[in-house]
Amino acid sequence: MTQHTLHAFTDDALGTDDATALAERLQRGDISTTDATEAAIARLQRVNPTLNGLVLDTYAEARGRANNKHFEGFFAGVPSLIKDNIDLRGLPTGHGSASVGGKPMKKTSVLAKQYLAQGFNLLGKTTLPAFGFTASTEMAHAPATRNPWHLNHSAGGSSGGSAALVAAGAVPLAHGNDGGGSIRIPAAVCGLVGLKSTRGRLVTQEAAKALPVNIISDGVLTRTVRDTANFFAEAEKYYRNSKLPAVGHVTGPGKQRLRIGLMVDSIAGDPTCPQTRAAVEATAKQLSALGHHVDVARIDLPQRFVDDFLLYWAMLAFFVSKFGRALFPQGFDGQQLDPLSQGLAGYYRQRFLKTPGMLRQLRQSQARYAEVFNQYDVVLTPVLAHTTPELGYLGADVDFDTQLERLLRYTTFTPANNASGSPGLSLPLGQADNGLPIGVQLNGRHGEERTLLELAFELEQVQPFSRLDQR
């Protein structure tokens, strides 16, 4: 492929606006919902044949809603997309796997209801790797989702379809969820803002309620901090978890100077690649220049945390393989499971006797993770251990042992937030030699998304994030 980048930004009704600016123009009547919808559909039709970020489109339904102007909420009429592991009545939910049937779902999930309450006009469902089990949206049964910053490279996973289409400018904002880094990883490699919120911040998906340790958080992929901040402020109006501090409406930097811990290498002791290290250290210097106190930190999680999280991840794959027919009412064929899911299920079968100890350790991780925040307000880390790989590095045809080794090395920083339930925010603050973005992660106390967003606003002001049309 000779073309390296691809974007949809043009002089149409969407322009280069983020979701907040577009919502304001729609509210004023500067453009109509039909204008916004048609522009987004045209953009998707232009870039998706190359990027492969859509599983299915709902253009006809979106046009009908736009014509009828049936939108309420902060983002009323803003075109958006939702990941294909969320149920919408009348549409199939494929979970990125050929093993799951295509029958339309009978109910809309509670999470989708909270999402739609903000007024988005959904144009389709986005790609993910099978069951979200890997960090690149490469499927055994379908073309890989490509990174619009460099089409030969991964768009991350598992919310890769949403990330690719937001980064390309097809829509200003799209849904994602994160069970081990699946919002933050695609945000990092596609140059976006991605917040993995505190456990329980949004309504809990039906399937997540049954998990022995709920590692899943939902959210959005955006191009600006204010879009992410406004999404969570509006989501809180729909559902407010009284056990957590309110996020509220964050509109800019905070005034307090923070104690920031810097951790460049992972708890597993793996070294971070030089380009990623340089991006994180440059952010640390920027924070120091802004008056924050930065010094080296260490998160007190045991070395066995990596093994425990891997075993939990494998246990979920085993549940899919063993109980798929009960889990997926739209139909399930275990013979169509992808190699990674099969490999993870086999890994768990060989080690299932370790389950009680693994669950005990993961449940204790919240308290252990929280200890670092006795000394710091925020911990600064990479999102990923090295720069974005080319497509195929984590491809569905890579043998299980090789793919597992590569995944564990690549995604070493993100799972701690999922096990502990704490928030983590990926920001596009670095750039690799080949032009691909590098994500830097802000980690916060349980329930302290507001602190992370205020700090993110400050960093965005001094180092505005790049867009593809600005290259």
Image: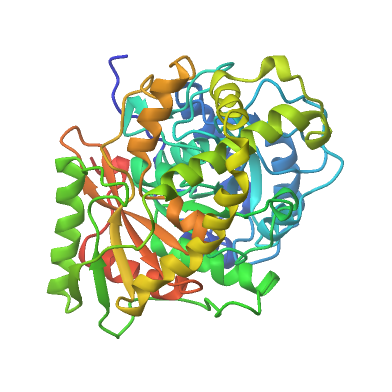
Rendered location of residue 88, percent (x, y):
76, 43
Residue at left offset 84%, top offset 46%: 107
Q: Is residue 327 above or below residue 458?
A: above
Horizontal relation, residue 5 to residue 237: left or right: left
Rendered location of residue 157, percent (x, y):
47, 37
Horizontal relation, residue 405 to residue 209: left or right: left
Q: Where does the C terminus fall, quadrant-wise?
A: top left
Residue at left offset 39%, top offset 21%: 402
Rendered location of residue 22, percent (x, y):
50, 58
Q: Residue furthest front?
A: 353
Q: Looking at this view, is 51 or 367 the one in front?
A: 367
Color theme of the render: rainbow
Q: Looking at this view, is 284 or 87 the one in front?
A: 284
Is residue 462 in view? yes
Rendered location of residue 207, percent (x, y):
73, 48
Residue at left offset 55%, top offset 17%: 140
Q: Where does the N terminus fall, quadrant-wise?
A: top left
Q: Looking at this view, is 144 or 217 the one in front?
A: 217
Q: Is residue 134 above or below residue 428?
A: above
- The image quadrant of residue 284 is bottom left
Horizontal relation, residue 316 to residue 151: left or right: right
Q: Looking at this view, is 229 or 98 the one in front?
A: 98
Residue at left offset 70%, top offset 27%: 321
Q: Is residue 354 above or below residue 416?
A: above
Q: Is residue 239 above or below residue 380?
A: below
